[in-house]
């Protein structure tokens, strides 16, 4: 046997094994049930002092500019999802009855009683993967893990009248994990978290007046002491905090309306994206199958030609080469179809982002535009609150240069 014939034989056998492994992998599919995991709801009323307020920051969309053409990420959609996913989680947590007010906010806030942050790792209508972290005001980490879910085809079927979010199971699992962490804490620990949150808010306004009441070690906060009953500074802080809550409630309402408004077009995008993802997977499998089969045909043809004892056998062998080459070509053509599906998804993503409009609100005589700069506007508002408190008390706000450092140098 010639060297070329031996190589062709080994190649054909290797490709046949690869094809068999690929085809067996395609058969292994599982049936997905809709809303298989239910969120646990409170069976009795929880004392008000133990109901933690929950803030959910707008999620990290999970991409950096520039976005690669073939990454499957559409920035217009991801930006919308970074607000929509916290909205869905908010609705889930609020419905369980285990929490105080649950709000969506532009950015993390260290004085939140329970702060939830997240990052979108994968989202294409079929698969959703999120990295989620929850930390309370004392610095205790409640959860820090990755959640993933694959939507059932029934979720996008016209025959499903339930209107359940295709990824509701994922939100329910997050809610249940948070509840498990909550149940691990005593009533006193829950009340202490609320106290620490208030003191951290007060300390952010005026460390000179409040830092003495907090103890911090390695990022963990605890109560060192409490202000005297009737302390006027505490009353002022509470008044400032109430103003802050009003803005946070306004921001939360903005995200709530945003979620409600994009629900329709976003569901349509997800349904189309789900189908596109299935089409892409089908194209990928067909393309690989055709190319593997084509390569096997080419290798087998070359091997057959090398072993042929007459012209007829050689002609038949070379026909195998030609046929295998055709399969290779059609396999490559199948991959070309993928670009068409990607273009379709891009158009859908652009149509979704066109429905997003900035919202202008009036609060305390200040006009705030809730758009991509909502985080900056919120930070500006917090700085304004510090100035209001400083003007009322005469105490310098946190971060203010009162000249004391210069005095020490003299």
Image: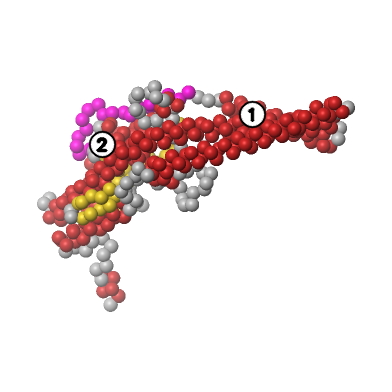
Query: Residue at image x 67%, y 36%?
Result: 329
For the N terminus, the quadrant is top right
In this picture, is 210 found above or below 71? below
Query: Residue at image x 52%, y 37%?
Result: 341
Q: Position of residue 33 (x, y in %)?
A: 42, 24
The overriding secondary structure of the stretch rendered in magenta is: loop
Q: Can residue 387 be seen in this view?
A: yes
Quarter of the image for residue 304 reads top right
State which mark lies toward you, 1 or 2.
1
Provide the residue span drawn in magenta.
Answer: 31-52
Q: Mark 2 points at which residue?
A: 99
Q: Which residue occupies the foreground of this view, 355 or 87?
A: 355
Q: Inspect the magenta stretch and tell me whether residue 44 lies in it.
A: yes
Q: Where is residue 395 in the image (x, y as percent from the top left)?
A: 19, 63
Q: In this view, does 146 lie to the left or right of 40?
A: right
Q: Inspect the magenta stretch and tell me whether residue 41 lies in it.
A: yes
In this picture, is 226 found above or below 330? below
Query: Which SS class for mark 1?
Result: helix
Q: Which residue occupies the foreground of this view, 336 or 292?
A: 336
Query: Residue at image x 22%, y 28%?
Result: 44
Q: In this view, does 238 lie to the left or right of 24?
A: left
Query: Residue at image x 23%, y 54%?
Result: 367
User: Which residue is farthest right?
Assistant: 310
User: Which residue is farthest bottom?
Assistant: 410
Q: Is residue 381 left or right of residue 29?
A: left
Q: Can residue 214 be seen in this view?
A: no
Q: Name the residue under label 1.
A: 21
Query: Which SS class for mark 2?
Result: loop
Quarter of the image for residue 181 reads top left
């Amino acid at each position: 046997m010639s060297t070329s014939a031996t190589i062709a034989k080994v190649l054909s056998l290797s490709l046949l094994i690869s094809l068999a492994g690929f085809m067996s992998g395609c058969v292994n599919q599982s049936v997905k049930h809709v809303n298989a995991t239910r969120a646990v709801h409170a069976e009795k009323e929880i004392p008000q002092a133990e109901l933690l307020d929950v803030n959910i920051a707008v999620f990290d969309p999970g991409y950096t500019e520039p976005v690669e053409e073939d990454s499957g990420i559409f920035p217009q959609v991801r930006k919308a999802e970074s607000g929509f996913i916290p909205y869905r989680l908010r609705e889930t947590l609020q419905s369980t009855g285990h929490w105080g007010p649950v709000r969506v906010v532009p950015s993390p806030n260290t004085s939140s009683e329970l702060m939830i942050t997240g990052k979108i790792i994968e989202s294409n209508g079929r698969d959703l993967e999120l990295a989620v972290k929850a930390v309370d005001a004392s610095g205790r980490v409640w959860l820090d893990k990755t959640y993933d879910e694959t939507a059932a085809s029934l979720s996008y079927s016209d025959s499903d009248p339930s209107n359940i979010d295709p990824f509701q199971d994922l939100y329910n699992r997050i809610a249940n994990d948070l509840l498990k962490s909550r149940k691990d804490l005593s009533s006193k620990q829950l009340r202490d978290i609320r106290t620490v949150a208030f003191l951290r808010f007060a300390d952010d306004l005026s460390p000179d007046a409040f830092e003495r009441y907090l103890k911090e070690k390695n990022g963990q906060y605890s109560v060192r002491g409490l202000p005297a009953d009737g302390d006027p500074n505490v009353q002022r802080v509470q008044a400032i905090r109430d103003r802050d809550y009003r803005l946070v409630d306004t921001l939360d309402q903005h995200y709530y309306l945003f979620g409600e408004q994009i629900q329709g077009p976003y569901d349509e995008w997800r349904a189309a994206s789900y189908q596109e993802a299935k089409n892409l997977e089908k194209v990928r499998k067909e393309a690989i199958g055709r190319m593997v089969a084509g390569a096997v045909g080419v290798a087998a043809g070359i091997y057959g030609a090398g072993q042929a004892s007459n012209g007829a056998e050689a002609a038949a062998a070379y026909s195998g080469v030609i046929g295998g080459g055709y399969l290779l070509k059609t396999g490559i053509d199948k991959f070309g179809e993928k670009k068409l599906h990607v273009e379709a998804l891009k158009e859908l993503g652009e149509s979704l982002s066109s429905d997003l409009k900035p919202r202008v609100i009036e609060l305390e005589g200040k006009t705030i535009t809730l758009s991509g700069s909502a985080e900056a506007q919120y930070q500006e508002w917090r700085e304004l609150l510090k100035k209001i408190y400083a003007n009322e008390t005469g105490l310098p706000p946190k971060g203010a240069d009162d000249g004391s450092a210069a005095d020490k140098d003299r």
